[in-house]
Image (cartoon, rainbow, N blue to C red):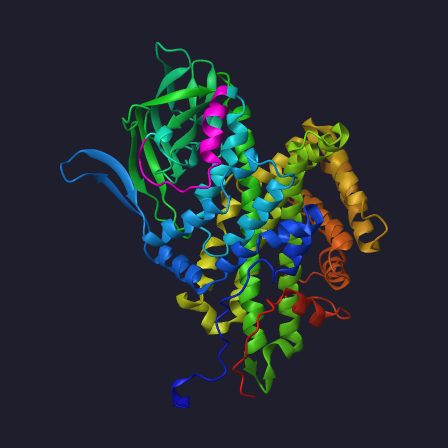
């Protein structure tokens, strides 16, 4: 017989188990729109596991028990290994197994990148840190294509759905993971200030590297793309962790970074002391070679931030639906409805834009598409990636903090998982170019590649006439472009305007009428009050909240 005094009243039940994919209406609609209902249904096993108690526990454990650097073995030999908690390996094995690494680049299916993006979005909600090696592995392949022989050797390894951890020659493993080493102490995002030297050997295309890398994540990965100064300038190199003969390449792991978030993932400082490297692309063309990897990782930054938003929204909406105060459920309080509805609008706008970018990758990679369509998608991706990277990632900390507050004190304790999300929330705005870097990249694209503005105008033009507030916002943005396209001090303002117009155009075409109306009224209608939870009157807030709340068969414990 249960002792009622031992059961805490008025507590929301845990949001688990649930299907992270099928309970997310906005995600399912986006996948169906850009791929098919069949692709969306095929993600159900991933979604079910992502929302399981087992996955939740592994996510928490991987962060509570972070990676440990082992520089020497017991005999004093330099080994430079990183040890991970078993929960990290559990998450990685399944992430790789679901094809969230480089699998889309070798897949025959027409919507491989949309499928992978949706899977990455959903699976990252288990624990965001292990998304880093998955993302770098995905992103490496387009850069490797600059050399057909290198791509032929490494792409199948990176596309494998087998997680094979450990330092062994890549040719002896069932699957490989990739990383990247770009930044250095003195330059950061200014990679042209790199000092690491690449010295040619007697063998054509082979070099030794001498210098350091300030931020190299996942140092146990099998291969890295690294920038260094060759005789003809900054060049990209392929650096295997273990050489073909079984010898460990000289990558000295100086220390692991003690970071605000992303604590499950090992981010390291490396010293390169005669490290063997193979040139990738021509000397002096390093940035141009690695830029495709940067573009793909930026897409995952957008997906990762949108994933954090969705996870935070799910926890907040679930909590207020089951928690009571002052005589009724929190979700029935008008002001709380406003807050959760605003969170839902922000999340859905991020999801829609992220998935549209993934669809652009599929289109560019599809040789059967008309050339004009592929050109549009390529130009759109060029301008929309830095726009989305700037705006979606910049909005994430504010959004996650507001969602945490919906849980009150319960959201401030580690057991809720919300502090983990909050610590993670600034990450993607810093990785792969901070806010200023991406805003300035927008100006660079507009000034050097006129087709990108045409692509943006075409994309937002598809929603012309659907909402007068959107039409006015597009007109205002075009006026801003005409006046200050080269004004560096206004780069952030322009990036916000262009990104929000893109989100608005997607929502008025594809989201529910309630969500689109709320977005246009608040983000485009001039009524934004500087904080979430300030949607104007006259909107259907209950419908927005219902659309966003995971539909899980649970009994609440509110005793009012």
Relative depth, front residue between 379 and 490: 379
Q: Is residue 204 above or below residue 304?
A: above
**Residue at x 57%, y 36% (from the top left corner):** 107
Relative depth, front residue between 101 and 469: 101
Q: Quadrant of residue 413?
A: bottom left
Give x and y (percent) for residue 149: 49, 20
Give x and y (percent) for residue 298: 55, 40
Q: Is residue 411 left or right of residue 391?
A: left
Q: Quadrant where the N terminus lies?
A: bottom left
Q: How many marks?
A: 0
Q: Is residue 249 left or right of residue 279?
A: left
Which residue is situated farthest in the top direction here? Answer: 202
Give x and y (percent) for residue 306: 58, 52
Give x and y (percent) for residue 7: 42, 84
- The reply to whether the magenta stretch includes residue 188 is no
Residue 188 visible in the snapshot: no
**Residue at x 67%, y 60% (from the top left corner):** 345
Relative depth, front residue between 305 and 434: 305
Relative depth, front residue between 434 and 380: 380
Residue 293 visible in the snapshot: yes
Q: Is residue 124 above or below residue 370?
A: below
Which residue is situated farthest in the left direction here? Answer: 75
Q: Quadrant of residue 167?
A: top left
Q: Which residues lie in the magenta part?
A: 149-168
Which residue is situated farthest in the right direction here? Answer: 465
């Amino acid at each position: 017989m249960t002792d009622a005094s031992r059961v805490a009243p008025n507590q929301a039940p845990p949001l688990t188990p649930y299907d992270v994919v099928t309970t997310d209406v906005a995600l399912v609609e986006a996948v169906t729109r850009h791929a098919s209902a069949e692709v969306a249904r095929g993600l159900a096993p991933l979604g079910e596991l992502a929302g399981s108690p087992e996955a939740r526990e592994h996510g928490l454990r991987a962060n509570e028990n972070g990676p440990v650097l082992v520089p020497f073995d017991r005999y004093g030999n330099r080994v430079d290994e990183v040890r991970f908690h078993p929960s990290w390996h559990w998450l990685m094995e399944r992430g790789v197994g679901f094809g969230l690494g480089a699998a889309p680049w070798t897949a025959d299916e027409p919507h491989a990148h949309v499928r992978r993006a949706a899977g990455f979005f959903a699976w990252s909600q288990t624990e965001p840190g292990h998304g880093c090696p998955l993302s770098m592995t995905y992103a490496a392949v387009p850069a490797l294509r600059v050399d057909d022989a290198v791509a032929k050797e490494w792409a199948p390894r990176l596309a494998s759905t087998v997680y094979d951890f450990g330092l062994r020659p890549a040719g002896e493993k069932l699957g490989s993971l990739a990383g990247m080493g770009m930044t250095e102490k003195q330059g950061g995002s200014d990679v042209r200030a790199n000092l690491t030297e690449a010295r040619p050997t007697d063998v054509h295309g082979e070099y030794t590297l001498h210098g350091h890398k300030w931020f190299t994540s996942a140092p146990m990965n099998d291969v890295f793309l690294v920038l260094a100064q060759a005789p003809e300038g900054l060049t990209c190199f392929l650096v295997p962790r273990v050489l073909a003969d079984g010898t460990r390449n000289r990558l000295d792991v100086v220390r692991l970074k003690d970071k605000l978030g992303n604590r499950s993932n090992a981010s390291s400082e490396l010293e390169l002391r005669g490290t063997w490297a193979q040139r990738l692309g021509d000397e002096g063309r390093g940035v141009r070679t690695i830029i495709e990897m940067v573009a793909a990782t930026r897409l995952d930054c957008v997906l990762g931030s949108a994933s954090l938003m969705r996870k935070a929204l799910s926890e907040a909406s679930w909590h207020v639906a089951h928690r009571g105060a002052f005589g009724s459920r929190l979700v029935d309080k008008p002001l709380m409805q406003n807050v959760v509805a605003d969170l839902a609008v922000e999340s859905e706008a991020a999801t829609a834009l992220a998935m549209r970018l993934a669809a652009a990758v599929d289109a560019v990679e599809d040789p059967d598409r008309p050339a004009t369509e592929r050109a549009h998608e390529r130009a759109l991706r060029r301008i929309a990636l830095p726009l989305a990277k700037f705006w979606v990632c910049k909005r994430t900390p504010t959004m996650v903090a507001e969602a945490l507050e919906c849980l009150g004190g319960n959201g401030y304790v580690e057991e809720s998982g919300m502090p983990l999300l909050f610590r993670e929330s600034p990450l993607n705005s810093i990785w792969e170019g901070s806010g200023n870097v991406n805003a300035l990249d927008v100006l660079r694209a507009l000034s050097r590649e006129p087709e990108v503005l045409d692509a943006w105008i075409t994309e937002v033009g598809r929603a012309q006439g659907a909402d007068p507030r959107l039409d006015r916002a597009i007109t205002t943005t075009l006026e801003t472009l005409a006046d200050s396209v080269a004004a560096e001090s206004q780069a952030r303002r322009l990036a916000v305007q262009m990104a929000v117009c893109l989100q608005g155009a997607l929502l008025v075409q594809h989201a529910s009428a309630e969500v689109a109306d709320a977005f246009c009224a608040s983000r485009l209608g001039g009524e934004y009050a500087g904080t979430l939870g300030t949607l104007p009157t006259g909107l259907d807030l209950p419908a927005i909240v219902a659309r966003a709340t995971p539909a899980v068969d649970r009994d609440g414990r509110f005793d009012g």
